[in-house]
Image: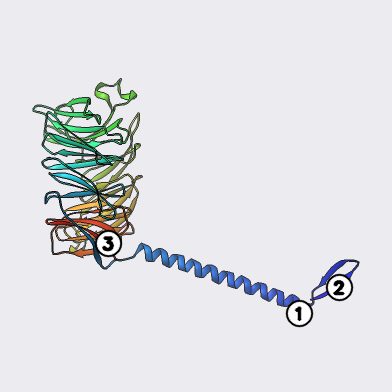
Amino acid sequence: MEQKTKAGFSLYINSNENFQNAVILQEKKKKYRKVLVIVLAAICILSFFAYRYRTYHHMKVVKSITKDLSDSVQSFAFKSGTICYSEDGVSFLDGNGQKKWNQTYSVKNPMASYCKDYIVIASKNGNEVVLLDDDGHMKQFSVSYPIIDAEVAGQGVIALILQGENANYIELYEAAQKKLVSIKTTADQNGYPMDIDLSSDGENLAVSYLVVDGINTKSRVAFYNFGDEGKEREDQLSAGFDFSDTIIPKVSFMGDSRVCAVGDNKMILFKAGKIPSKKKEVKIEETVKSIDVNEKYIAVIIENQKKSAEDKFEARIFNRSGRKVMSKGFSSEYNKIALGDKELLVTGNYQFSIFNFAGHEMFHKDLKKRIVDISPTGKKRKYLISYENGIELVNLR
């Protein structure tokens, strides 16, 4: 490149050779950029698939926990830890297996539910109800009739289905055990209540009824509103939907605006609120064997009668809109499923598997000790396994 100066101005004159060199250099830079972009994209794609289809081969016992509860310990993930409960009491363990609090009680055949900061533990077919907050403060009371189902809202309101002598009752209690609502239901007028769930604000209740009409049976999903909108309606019933070709054992709120009802051959999604409405119906041709629901996803295990023994069961995951996000066949016998953070735990007596939402089996383990329960801990790759003679915090590697 030649440079000439005149009257304080600089003039640049490119020779033909320098111009060609500049063009070649520019083309090389473009090629380098393209190669760099391709390499970075390949690294991102490989990292994505390595993460999505990662497999763990070992299970390390991080901690063995002394079992203060009875042998029949059940557990579920709660906040950043795990709730363990039995007939004798309840404990909260953090993600490292450290016991943060413990409460004792006597509740036969306990069943549990939770929402935000509250946990309810009730005696199925008994009369005892225990309410706890996330700090372990406990309140306990008894009800007049045997309990069929129990749920809790985010501010501690408890909903119960009670089995009376000639009728059933849906009753709501506040955290101080004061009865707020009592609704009498009969088999002739309403049907037999199978499942209930409360919205987190405690204002809306969904109930699944089994209705027998002569030799015919059908399911009814009823919505009750306990806010200002429901006060003007009889029994505070805001809507009801009948389904003649399915039995619905499970209804669940997914947030305050969406309700999922899963039957033996279909799944129905509703919009809750002042005027509940049916949004979507998903048919399931095979027999539904197990169900689990959280605020974001619905897990359904079906039994494939026509497929090979290797795919005896199929796990399907749906999102809140009813779109299927995962389908995976498996053959292991199981007795419990649980949704984690974009993962599904399938547990049998002596083995368990963990599937991610790509349908990939991240981990499988056969054990010599019988598993009572297994649940996530709130920390990645850490799980709490309850056996008949102890509890272990394990880490997948």
Residue position for label 2? 4
Snapshot quadrant of residue 234: top left
Q: Amino acid at mark 3?
A: Asn
Q: Position of residue 218 (x, y in %)?
A: 18, 36
Give whichever of 222, 336 is nearer the camera: 336
Mark 1 / mark 2, whichever is N-terminal: 2
Residue position for label 1? 17
| Residue 135 disc label | none
Q: Amino acid at mark 2?
A: Lys
Looking at the figure, which quarter contains the C terminus?
A: bottom left
Q: Position of residue 119 (x, y in %)?
A: 24, 40
Determine whether the residue tagged by mark 1 lies in a helix, strand or loop: helix
| Residue 395 disc label | 3
Q: Position of residue 392 (x, y in %)?
A: 20, 58
Determine whether the residue tagged by mark 3 lies in a helix, strand or loop: strand
Above or below, comparing residue 198 to residue 262 in the picture: above
Q: Which residue is most to the left?
A: 165
Determine whether the residue tagged by mark 2 lies in a helix, strand or loop: strand
